[in-house]
Amino acid sequence: MAETLTIWTLDWVPPGPRGFVRDLRLRWAAEEAGLAYVVRTIAFEDRETNHLDRQPFGQVPFLTDGDVALFESGAGLLHLAGKSETLMPRDTAGGAETLQWTIAALNSIEMVSVPWWFLKVTGQAENGLASWMDKRLAQLEVVLSKRDWLAAGRFTVADLIMADVLRVSDVRARGERPATEAYVARVTARPAFRKAHADQIAHFAAADSERSKRG
Ligand SMILES: N[C@@H](CCC(=O)N[C@@H](CS)C(=O)NCC(=O)O)C(=O)O
């Protein structure tokens, strides 16, 4: 019998990050691909040290799939994309373009958006990363004003990760970028995103009930 695909996340988080914890990326990809999976957890309380053997930075998510164990949400997405043409076209050009935009989401957009956002929420509204952030978002707006999907003329894992990076409220609120806004709305309207999002919210809500029973 095939080993179960398992997505690992935290057993609980405070309300703020709910709907944005990155296990959602893997849930969403598995839903898009029609892959069966289970979600298992590690404890929030000592998260920085309780799973360093499986995620050396003490973060989530990580993924197990039979003998394969992977951390980094991007690596997990590419692993799932290897199982599904829905996520990654099988032709050489389409696959290469999808890989390129997946890396661009992580290494050209999220690379600046996360530190920018962190400085913002820690009190520096106009921080030193603002102009870099604005430049990248403006460049992406040009791309998205010319096409509906990033790669291969259709939805791929590149859109999943790019939309997940861009849907952060503070990023969406940064400037007028109508093509990007329409793109985020279009990609996150997909039933697989809706289900993954609702499941994550329900997962942490159930954890609230458990915690309140424990007192
Ligand atoms: N580059 C990592 C980032 C993972 C990450 O930031 N995880 C957050 C949750 S979304 C986390 O575990 N935060 C808890 C912490 O850093 O202590 C990935 O994409 O997997």
Image (tube, helix red, strand yellow):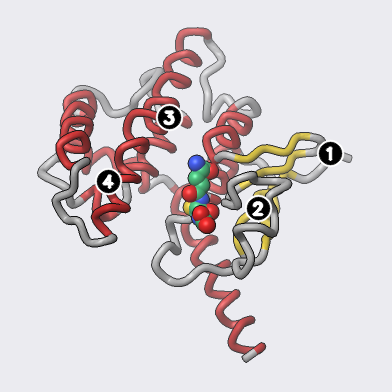
The x, y position of residue 14, in whole percent, is 47, 71
Name of the residue lying farthest toward the left? 176
- Give, as a three-letter code, the residue at label 3: Ala
Q: Nearer the viewer, mark 2 or mark 3?
A: 2
Question: Which sits earlier in the primary sequence, circle 2 or circle 3?
Answer: 2
Q: Earlier in the sequence, mark 4 or mark 2?
A: 2
Residue behind mark 1 = 2
> Regarding mark 1 in the picture, which secondary structure is present there?
loop
Please tell me the numbered disc located at residue 75.
none
The residue that label 4 is drawn on is 116
Q: Along the polypeptide, which appears first: circle 2 or circle 1?
A: 1
Left-right relation of 98 to 85 = left
Residue occupying image coordinates x 22% and y 24%: 143
Q: CA distance from mark 4 to mark 2?
A: 27 Å
Q: Is mark 1 within 8 Å of ligand 1?
A: no
In the rendered structure, which amino acid carries the disc numbered 4?
Trp
Neighbor class of circle 1 (other Cα within 10 Å; few <14, some 14-19, many 20+) is: few
Name the foreground residue: 128 vs 20: 128
The disc label shown at residue 8, or none: 2
Give the residue displayed 59% in from the left and 42% down from the top: 30
Relative to 180, residue 16 above or below: below
Q: Is residue 4 shown above or below 95?
A: below
Place of residue 210 in the rendered image (x, y in percent of width and height, measured from the top left): 64, 81
Mark 2 falls on what kind of element?
strand
Residue position marked by numbered label 3 in the rendering: 158
Are the residues flagged by discs 3 and 4 in contact, CB closer than 8 Å? no
